[in-house]
Amino acid sequence: MTTVPDRIDRRFREAAATAGLLDVAYDYTDSPVGKLLVATSERGLCRISFDPEPERELDWLSRAFGARVLRSAGPIDPVRRELDEYFEGGRREFDLPVDLTPLPDFQRDVLVELIRVPYGHVDTYGGLARRIGKPRAARAVGGALNRNPIPIVVPCHRIVGASGSLTGYGGGLERKQALLGLEGALLPT
Amino acid sequence: MMEAVAAIPPFERFYEERKDEIFGYLARLLGREAAEDAFQETFLRALRGYGKLEHGRHLRAWAFTIATRVAVDQRRRATPVAEAPEVPVHDERPVYAELEHLAGELPPTERAAVVLRFGYDLSYDDIGAALGSSAEAARAAASSGVRRLRRKENA
């Protein structure tokens, strides 16, 4: 059977993105915390996934943003660049716009507030709950963080338990520790 | 429980499933070099239409439809060919298998009908849709194409 030459396949994927025909472009990138799937919508970065399972990711992206999801390297390059700078220690803030539009209001409020926790600092679930004006919602905040679609850039690793314990992390506690270590964060004692 | 709906798959999945077959089809219709541009045009057109699909049924036939239109447009810009005379034909598939190497000289719609029917086993309904006509017209185009191939072989 005839197969499409790689060069023709790549050319189509780039042309599709350049023509603005995609709801979502995604690609993979290597990082010190493992291979990541990174996706952008027309509004901005919309997904970073640890240990990605491609079929599940495609289904989620397609439901959340539209079915025109295609792997295409070009639109991901700016994200790749900022992530590389972050992991090399040279970047403390991301300039990338993020797209949180498909999320429920509460989760979006939590994540928007979370973006304001600075590099190298930590806050607690309760603290974040208070800052969004829902002081009794610490547990719900935990749930919202656990389903954060854009970890690292939306820094849910900076939220820890009131005792200073790492508590939990969607990408696994080792990664949370690695990210906080990279940032030189001091945990509350 | 609800009946499973033929959901529209993420485009990546559709593209990965169809890309080699569509490239092969275009290469048969147009030759490999012209197929490269037609391939890109086919899937860009598919992307333009993808957001308007209402379900995920018949996506294979849909992909062939777009590819056929792209190829026919491209070949119409090349040379026109005279109509084939009426000669009755019966089982055309073996004839096509022997004569495919001559198919490059058929007019675009006949060539597409012949290749879709005998090369990819599409139904005349689907081929009619691909050609923007009817099942009857598709059958006629395939028959006419096979007659022309026979004539070329005997020429």
Image: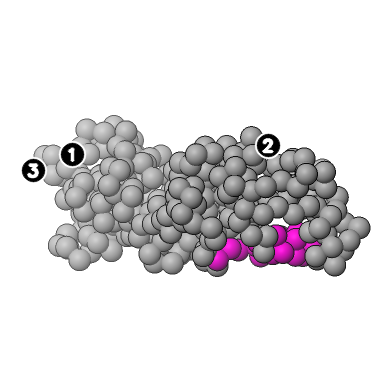
Q: CA distance from mark 3 to mark 2?
A: 76 Å
Q: Which residue is mark 3?
A: B155
Residue lying at the far front of the rendered structure: A189
Residue B7 percent location from the top left of the image: 63, 50
Q: CA distance from mark 1 to mark 2?
A: 62 Å
Residue A186 percent location from the top left of the image: 67, 47
Q: Chain letter of disc 2?
A: A
Q: Amino acid at mark 3?
A: Ala
Q: Is residue B90 visible?
A: no
Q: Circle 2: is it few (<14), some (14-19), or many (20+) Cα within 10 Å?
A: some
Residue located at (56% from left, 45% from top): A182
Q: Are marks 1 and 2 in contact (CB under 8 Å)?
A: no
Q: Circle 3: is it few (<14), some (14-19), or many (20+) Cα within 10 Å?
A: few
| Residue A180 placement: quadrant | top right
Secondary structure beneath label 2: helix
Q: Nearer the viewer, mark 1 or mark 2?
A: 2
Magenta region, residue range: A97-115
Q: Which residue is mark 1?
A: B101
Q: Which residue is mark 2?
A: A173
Viewport quadrant of the N terminus of chain B = top right
Viewport quadrant of the C terminus of chain B = top left
